[in-house]
Each structure stands twice: as structure tokens, then as C-alpha cells.
Amino acid sequence: MALSDLFQPEFIKIGLEAEDKDEAFEELADAFCQAAKSDIREDVLEAVRERERKMSTGIQKGIAVPHGKTNAVDRVRGILGISRRGIDYDALDGEPVYLLFMVLAPQTETEKHLRILKRLAEMLQNPQFFTDLASQTDPAAAAAVIKKYESILTALD
């Protein structure tokens, strides 16, 4: 599964208003449920919070990848949130987070879940990807940035 398939424009929320990690989880869960036309908010929150209790998913400067497993989703799903002000995330580096890639997977999709996280980690190695994505003001443009950088990475594979 391609990241560009996972983070389609309807699953990208620009202008997150959350000030802290828990508010961000709630805002992304609400946006996900609205885009997916689903009422699994509590399942999403439980899965992400359970994983977060193990260790912060604020993985590198300005970036968090909250993720979790729940059978409330039928396949690997995701939503991207972009914050302008930054979110107090309790990240490993102590810095605010601006990009949040929330990934959800059914309990049975461990391999796909890990492949998505690995692909995302590979793309995030390019600092220009962060810069280009964080500056977007339109979900379709943000989705195009993801597709562009994924194409570059695929060409290098």
C-alpha cells in the first residue's frame, strides 16, 4: 500500500488547533471518522493511546507518527494532521510537533502496518519532505507532495 493511497486529501487535516498530544489525538480521530464516515472514535483513541503509553511517537524534529491497532478498521488507514503553531507532544527531542501521521491497522495486519511505518520513516529522512509538506495550505496540495516524494523514493528502490 502506498502512502499516497493512505493519505488522500480527505484524510489530511490542515490547521490543527490542538495544543497538546491528547487534543491532537482527539482532533485527528474526529477528522478521521468524518472522512471515513465511521463512528469508531473511541476505538481509534484507545488504540493510539495504548501505543503511546509504551513510548512517545514524536520521533524526530517536528514529526510524530501516532499509530495503533484496532479491529474497528478493516484495513490499514491513516490521517495526516498539519499544525501551524506546533503541538506540545512530549516528543523524544522535546520539540513541538507540526506533522502528525496517524496510522491505524487491524490486529491481523501487522506486516502491512510495519511496512507503512517503514516507508514513512524512509520518506521522513529527507528534510525537504518535511519542509514542503508542512508549508501546504490545501489538502490536495499536501497529498501531491506525498505522492511526489514517494515517487522519488520508489525510483531509488
Image (cartoon, helix red, strand yellow):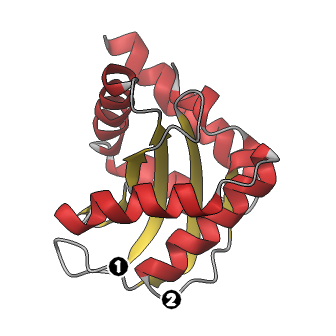
Alpha carbon distance from label 2 to label 1: 8 Å
Give coordinates of residue 147: x percent, y percent: 59, 30
- The reply, left or right, for residue 153 in relation to residue 146 is left
Tell me what residue is drawn at x 67 percent, y 52 percent.
12
Report which quarter residue 56 is drawn in. bottom left
Q: Secondary structure at mark 1?
A: loop
- The amino acid pointed to by label 2 is Glu
Report which quarter residue 16 is drawn in. bottom right
Q: Earlier in the sequence, mark 2 or mark 1?
A: 2
Disc 2 target residue? 19
Q: Secondary structure at mark 2?
A: loop
Q: Residues within 10 Å of mark 1 (few under 14, many from 20)?
A: many
- The amino acid pointed to by label 1 is Tyr
| Residue 55 in view here | no
Tell me what residue is drawn at x 30 percent, y 30 percent.
114
Give coordinates of residue 106: x percent, y percent: 47, 32
- The reply, left or right, for residue 81 in relation to residue 122 is right
Give coordinates of residue 88: x percent, y percent: 37, 85
Give coordinates of residue 97: x percent, y percent: 39, 73
Q: Which mark is residue 89?
A: 1
